[in-house]
C-alpha cells in the first residue's frame, strides 16, 4: 500500500528510476524473504519538487547535462550553489506531513538511519560507495528533515560530482531510504568473489569490525579479514593488523553469512558487494547488495569445463557421437526438471539454455557450465545444489547465471509440488533403477553382435532408433540415480561438517570405503579369479609368464586349453563392454582387440598379494569401525544412540542412503556402458551396409556422419548421398587438425566464441620444479608414498608396478583393473563421485582428484607423498 507525500514502503519499491538502485535492490531482497530492516523510501519526485521550490531545478538540470564539459572551478561553484539551495530550504509541505505521520506512528523513540539511493548508486555501472552521505542515529522529526536535505545535497558534493564525471554518469536522480537503525554488534562488508583476483575466484572475502559499520567504511578501523571457499565453506583467516574486534565471529556465523552471500550472487545473477550487520540477538541483517563494479562482467562470459565429461569422452568426439550426445544432455536436464516438479512453463522458458548444455571445443566435449548452473538454480536451494554439482563433477568455477525470478506465490506453489514429486521419485528409486536395467538388457539382447549380420537396412535403422528412444526419452530413471548420489553425498558432507566441525575433512569419504556390491568392481574381481586359475596350473603359468600376448592367445586356441579358453571367452562375452573409452564408440572393445586385457591378466598372474575382494573386505571393516566411532561421537550415550531421533540414528540413515545411492549409480553406469557398446556394433553393421552401397569407404566412416544423415541415408531420403564419402574425408581431416591442440580443463569465453589454440593455455615450459606441492580434492583419506607411474592410457597399464602412485589425466571404468595394485592415486580431472574416486574408496587408496597440470608437473619415477585427507600431493626429494 502506497504512503502519501512521495513515501513508499521499502518492500513496495518497483523501479530503480523512481527510488534509486539501492532501494530497488533492498526491496527485491525483502520480497524474497531475506533479512532487510523495514523502512520507507522517499521518491525522486520529492527531490525534484524541493529543487523546484528552492529555485535550483534548472541549475541542477544544466549541471547534469554539462557535467563532462564544465571546467573544475565552474563545476564546484555551481554545485556549491545547488547544495546551499537544498539545505537552506524547507522540505515540501506534503513530504513534511507524511514524515511527521510516519514518525508518530512508527519511529518515535527509535534511532533511524537515513541513507542515499541514487539512480546509479549500487548499479552495475557504478557503486558510488562512500560518495553519498548516510546519516545514522537520527532521533527526532527535525533530525529526519535535516538528514533528508543533507543526503540530497551530497549528490552535488565535490567528491560525488568528480566520481560521476570519471564514470561518465549523467543521472541526477535520487531516492532516500529511512529505516530503523540496526544496533549492530558486528558490521562488515562481504565480496562474493575476491576482487583482487580475476572475478572468477572460488572464494568470497569478508571484512568486519565490532559495532557500527561507519568506522569500517570511513577507514577509521582496520577490520578482521578472512576468505571462505565457495565449494566447502572452508575458512581461511588472513594475518591483518586489525583493531576494534575483541570477540571474533564464530565459524558457524561466518558460514551462515557465506551461504546467504552465495544465494545473493545467484539471486542477482552476478558477483555481489554486500553490506551487513549482526544485531544483539545474533541475527544477520542485510543493509545493501550491489554488483562488484571492479569486475569486468563482460569478460566473465561463458564458463566451459571438461570436469567429469572428459572422463567419459577424453578424446575428440566423432560427429555421430556429438549429434546424439548433445540431444541426450538436453533431454537429461529437461526430464529431470519436469520429474522434480519444475513447471513446464519455466522449463519451456529455458529452452535456449537447455539446447546448449554441452559444446565442442577443439573437437572435445565441454560442459557449458554457465547454462548448467542456470538450470540447477531453478530448483529450491539452488546455490547449495550448484556447489554439490561442482563437487560431483570436479569443477570449481561458479559462473554468473541468467537468473529467472518468479513471484512468491508461484514459488511457494512450485515448492510444494517439487517436494511431493521428488519424494515420490525417490520412494521408488530402486524400482526405477531396475526398470532401466531391464530396458537396457532387452535392447542388449536384441542387438547382440551375433544377431546383426543378416539385418536389413530398415532393421538396423530400427535398432539405431531404439537406442535413441532410450537415450532421449527413457533415461530419467538412470538420471535420478545420479542426482541421488550427488545430493546424498553433499548432505553427508554438510551434516558431518556442521555436527563434528571441519577438522575431519575426509571423514565422509572414509565412511564410503569398501562398499560391498559395487557393480564396477565385478569385472576386476572376475579377471583376478582367472589369474588365480592360471597360477594353479604350472604349464599354463609358464605360458602366461613367458609369452607375448599375441602368441599366448594363439596357444590358448589349442585343444589342451579348451576349458580355460572357454572361461576366458565367457569373461569377454560378459564384460567386454567395460573398457576404457567405452562411450567414445570409436574404440575397439576387448572382444575385438583382447590384447590389452591379456596384458593386464599377465600382470595379475605375476602378483602374489591380496586380490581386490580381499582388499575390499579389509576396507569394509575399517568403514564399519569408522561408522561406529562417528555415531558414538555424535550421540555419546549408548541408550540415547538407539533413539530414531538421535543424531547418531539420523547420521546412519543418511549414510545408508548415500551408500545405496552410489551403488545404484554404479549399476546404471554399467548398463550405460552396455548400451553404448551395443550401439557401436549396430553402427559398424550400418557402416558395412553403406560401404556396400558405395556411400562410404570403410565401415568406421559411419562415425563421421550425424544421426540425421544416417537416418536419411538408410531411409533413402538423403539430399546428396554421393557426396558422403567426400564429406567424411573432409571431417576426418579437420578433426585430425583441430585435435592436435588440447584446450585447458576450464576457461572463459565471450558468448558465442570458440576456443582457439594459444588462448587460455598454460605455459608449456613449466616443470615439476615449478611446484613442490600440488593441490586438489581429497577423494579417499590416508597418506601414501611411492614412485610416480605417469600413465595416460589404460592400454599402458602393464607399466604400473605394485606399490606405485598412479598419476593420470582422467579415469573411466576401464581403469578399475589396475587400481587394487597401486598405493596411491593422483588424477588431473574428476570429482568426488567420478569412477576414479569411487574405486579408490573401494580399495582404500589415498587419492587426490582435480589436481591441475599433474601430468605436466610430475615425471615418471618422481617420489610422491599423496595426502588424501588434505587433498595435496607433495614431490619429495629422492
Image (cartoon, rainbow, N blue to C red):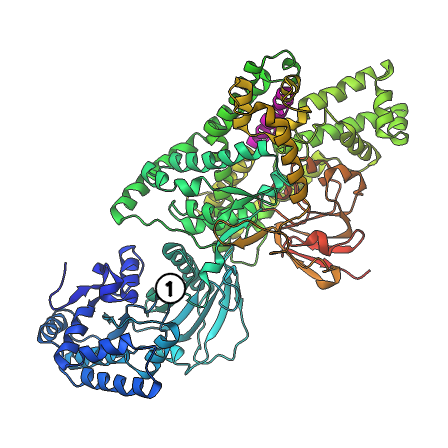
In front here: 666 or 609?
A: 666
Q: Is residue 230 above or below residue 224?
A: above
Residue 636 makes an appearance in the image: no
Q: Is residue 20 left or right of residue 619?
A: left
In front here: 850 or 196?
A: 196
Q: Is residue 415 above or below residue 520?
A: below
| Quadrant occupied by the N terminus | bottom left
The magenta region covers 667-686
Q: Is residue 551 above or below residue 59?
A: above
Q: Is residue 582 left or right of residue 228?
A: right
Whether 816 is among the magenta residues is no
Residue 245 makes an appearance in the image: yes
Give the x, y percent position of residue 642: 47, 43
In front here: 312 or 295?
A: 295
Q: Is residue 488 left or right of residue 146?
A: right
Q: Is residue 129 left or right of residue 535?
A: left
Residue 217 picture quarter: bottom left
Assign a secondary structure to mark 1. Answer: loop
Number of numbered discs on residues: 1
Residue neighbourhood size for the residue with mark 1, other residues' Cα within 10 Å, grouped as few (<14), some (14–19), many (≥20): some
In front here: 288 or 365?
A: 365
Whether 668 is among the magenta residues is yes
Give the x, y percent position of residue 147: 22, 79
| Quadrant occupied by the C terminus | bottom right
Give the x, y percent position of residue 359: 53, 42
Magenta region, main secondary structure: helix
Q: Residue at x 79, y 51 (%)?
A: 860
Give the x, y percent position of residue 572: 71, 23
Report the residue marked by disc 1: 124
Amino acid at each position: 500500500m502506497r504512503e502519501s507525500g512521495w513515501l513508499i514502503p521499502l518492500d513496495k519499491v518497483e523501479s530503480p528510476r523512481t527510488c534509486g538502485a539501492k532501494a530497488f535492490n533492498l526491496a527485491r531482497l525483502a520480497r524474497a524473504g531475506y533479512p532487510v530492516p523495514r523502512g520507507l523510501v522517499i521518491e525522486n519526485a520529492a527531490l525534484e519538487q524541493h529543487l523546484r521550490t528552492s529555485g535550483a531545478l534548472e541549475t541542477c538540470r544544466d549541471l547534469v547535462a554539462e557535467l563532462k564539459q564544465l571546467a573544475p572551478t565552474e563545476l564546484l561553484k555551481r554545485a556549491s550553489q545547488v547544495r546551499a539551495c537544498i539545505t537552506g530550504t524547507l522540505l515540501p509541505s506534503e513530504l513534511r506531513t507524511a514524515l511527521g505521520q510516519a514518525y508518530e506512528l512508527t519511529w518515535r523513540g527509535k534511532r533511524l538511519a537515513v541513507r542515499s539511493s541514487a539512480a546509479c548508486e549500487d548499479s552495475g555501472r557504478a557503486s558510488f560507495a562512500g560518495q553519498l552521505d548516510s546519516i545514522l542515529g537520527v532521533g527526532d522529526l527535525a533530525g529526519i528533515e535535516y538528514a533528508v536535505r543533507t543526503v540530497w545535497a551530497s549528490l552535488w558534493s565535490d567528491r560525488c560530482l568528480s566520481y560521476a564525471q570519471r564514470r561518465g554518469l549523467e543521472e541526477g536522480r535520487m531516492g532516500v531510504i529511512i529505516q530503523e537503525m540496526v544496533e549492530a554488534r558486528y558490521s562488515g562488508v562481504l565480496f562474493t568473489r575476491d576482487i583482487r583476483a580475476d572475478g572468477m575466484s572460488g572464494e568470497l572475502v569478508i571484512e568486519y569490525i565490532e559495532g557500527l559499520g561507519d568506522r569500517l567504511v570511513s577507514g577509521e578501523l582496520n577490520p578482521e579479514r578472512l576468505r571462505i571457499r565457495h565449494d566447502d565453506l572452508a575458512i581461511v583467516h588472513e594475518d591483518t593488523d586489525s583493531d576494534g574486534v575483541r570477540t571474533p565471529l564464530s565459524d558457524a556465523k561466518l558460514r551462515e553469512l557465506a551461504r546467504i552471500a552465495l544465494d545473493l550472487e545467484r539471486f542477482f545473477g552476478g558477483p555481489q558487494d554486500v553490506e551487513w550487520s549482526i544485531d544483539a540477538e545474533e541475527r544477520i541483517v542485510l543493509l545493501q547488495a550491489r554488483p562488484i563494479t571492479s569486475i569486468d562482467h563482460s569478460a566473465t562470459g561463458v564458463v566451459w569445463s571438461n570436469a567429469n565429461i572428459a572422463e567419459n569422452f577424453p578424446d575428440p568426439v566423432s560427429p555421430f557421437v556429438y549429434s546424439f550426445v548433445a540431444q541426450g544432455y538436453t533431454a537429461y536436464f529437461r526430464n529431470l526438471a519436469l520429474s522434480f516438479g519444475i513447471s513446464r512453463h519455466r522449463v519451456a522458458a529455458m529452452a535456449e539454455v537447455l539446447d546448449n548444455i554441452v559444446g565442442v571445443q577443439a573437437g572435445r566435449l565441454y560442459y557449458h557450465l554457465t547454462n548448467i548452473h542456470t538450470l540447477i538454480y531453478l530448483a529450491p536451494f539452488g546455490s547449495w545444489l550448484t556447489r554439490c554439482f561442482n563437487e560431483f563433477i570436479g569443477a570449481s568455477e561458479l559462473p554468473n547465471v541468467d537468473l529467472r525470478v518468479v513471484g512468491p506465490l508461484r514459488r511457494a506453489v512450485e515448492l510444494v509440488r517439487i517436494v511431493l514429486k521428488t519424494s515420490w521419485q525417490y520412494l521408488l528409486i530402486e524400482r526405477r533403477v531396475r526398470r532401466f536395467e531391464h530396458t537396457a538388457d532387452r535392447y542388449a539382447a536384441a542387438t547382440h553382435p551375433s544377431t546383426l549380420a543378416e539385418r536389413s537396412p530398415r532393421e538396423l535403422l530400427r535398432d539405431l532408433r531404439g537406442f535413441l528412444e532410450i537415450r532421449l526419452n527413457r533415461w530419467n530413471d538412470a538420471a535420478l540415480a545420479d542426482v541421488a548420489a550427488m545430493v546424498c553425498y553433499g548432505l553427508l558432507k554438510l551434516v558431518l561438517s556442521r555436527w563434528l566441525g571441519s577438522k575431519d575433512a575426509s571423514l565422509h569419504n572414509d565412511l564410503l570405503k569398501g562398499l560391498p556390491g559395487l557393480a564396477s568392481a565385478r569385472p576386476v574381481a572376475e579377471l583376478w579369479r582367472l589369474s588365480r586359475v592360471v597360477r594353479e596350473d604350472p604349464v599354463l603359468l609358464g605360458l602366461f609368464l613367458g609369452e607375448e600376448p599375441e602368441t599366448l592367445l594363439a596357444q590358448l586356441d589349442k585343444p589342451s586349453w579348451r576349458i580355460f579358453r572357454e572361461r576366458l571367452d565367457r569373461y569377454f562375452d560378459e564384460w567386454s563392454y567395460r573398457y576404457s573409452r567405452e562411450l567414445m564408440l570409436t574404440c575397439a572393445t576387448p572382444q575385438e582387440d583382447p590384447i590389452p586385457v591379456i596384458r593386464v591378466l599377465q600382470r595379475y598372474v605375476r602378483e602374489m598379494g591380496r586380490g581386490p575382494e580381499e582388499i575390499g573386505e579389509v576396507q569394509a571393516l575399517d568403514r564399519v569401525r569408522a561408522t561406529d566411532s562417528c555415531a558414538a561421537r555424535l550421540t555419546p550415550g549408548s541408550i540415547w544412540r538407539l533413539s530414531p531421533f538421535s543424531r547418531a540414528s539420523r547420521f546412519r540413515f543418511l549414510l545408508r542412503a548415500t551408500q545405496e545411492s552410489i551403488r545404484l549409480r554404479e549399476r546404471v553406469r554399467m548398463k550405460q556402458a552396455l548400451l553404448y557398446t551395443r550401439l557401436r556394433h549396430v553402427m559398424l553393421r550400418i557402416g558395412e551396409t553403406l560401404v556396400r552401397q558405395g556411400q562410404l569407404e570403410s565401415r568406421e566412416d559411419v562415425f563421421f556422419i550425424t544421426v540425421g544423415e544416417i537416418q536419411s541415408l538408410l531411409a533413402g531420403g538423403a539430399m546428396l548421398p554421393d557426396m558422403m564419402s567426400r564429406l567424411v574425408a573432409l571431417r576426418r581431416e579437420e578433426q585430425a587438425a583441430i585435435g592436435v591442440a588440447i584446450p585447458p580443463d576450464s576457461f572463459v569465453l565471450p558468448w558465442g566464441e570458440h576456443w582457439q589454440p594459444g588462448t587460455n593455455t598454460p605455459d608449456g615450459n613449466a616443470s615439476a620444479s615449478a611446484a613442490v606441492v600440488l593441490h586438489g580434492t581429497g577423494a579417499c583419506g590416508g597418506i601414501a608414498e611411492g614412485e610416480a607411474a605417469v600413465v595416460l592410457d589404460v592400454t599402458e597399464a602393464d607399466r604400473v608396478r605394485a606399490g606405485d602412485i598412479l598419476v593420470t589425466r582422467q579415469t573411466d571404468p576401464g581403469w578399475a583393473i589396475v587400481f587394487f595394485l597401486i598405493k596411491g592415486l593422483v588424477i588431473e580431472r574428476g570429482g568426488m563421485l567420478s569412477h576414479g574416486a569411487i574405486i579408490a574408496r573401494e580399495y582404500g587408496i589415498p587419492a587426490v582428484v582435480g589436481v591441475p597440470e599433474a601430468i605436466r608437473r610430475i615425471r615418471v619415477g618422481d617420489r610422491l607423498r599423496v595426502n588424501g585427507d588434505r587433498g595435496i600431493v607433495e614431490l619429495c626429494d629422492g
